[in-house]
Amino acid sequence: MSVNPGFGGQKFISTALDKLRRLRRTIDERGLNTKIEIDGGIDATNIEKIVEAGAEIIVSGTGVFGKGNGAEGVKELIDAGTVWA
């Protein structure tokens, strides 16, 4: 949804935020019990906007492991996303 499929480490495509907001709105308007998962280009610089747009399940490979220390990567994402933690 948020990168072109094929390989890891790609940048988040910002137009995915509009798609995410529309999807969240549609789910809410229809009263559906659906969680939105997003994968692709998610890191500490954009996770807050992604969660605010409606994502509830975050998949972040490079954002977690890209700097070599998975624990630090997770902490960085949590710290950046305290709006939802």
Image (cartoon, rainbow, N blue to C red):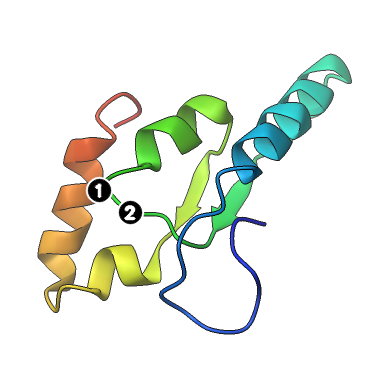
Residue contact between numbered discs 2 and 1, judged by CB atoms under 8 Å:
yes
Cα–Cα span, label 2 and label 1: 6 Å
Residue at figure coordinates x 76%, y 34% from the top left: 23
Most foreground residue, 61 or 32: 61
Answer left or right for 77 relative to 37.
Answer: left
The correct choice, above or below, for 1 with respect to 61 in the image is above
Q: Quadrant of residue 5?
A: bottom right
Tell me, for residue 17, which label it has, or none: none
Closer to the eye: label 2 or 1:
2
- Sequence-earlier tag: 2 or 1: 2
> Mark 2 is on which residue type?
Asp
Residue at figure coordinates x 64%, y 42% from the top left: 15
Tell me, for residue 43, which label it has, or none: 2
Q: Secondary structure at mark 1?
A: helix
Residue at figure coordinates x 13%, y 65% from the top left: 71
> Mark 1 is on which residue type?
Leu
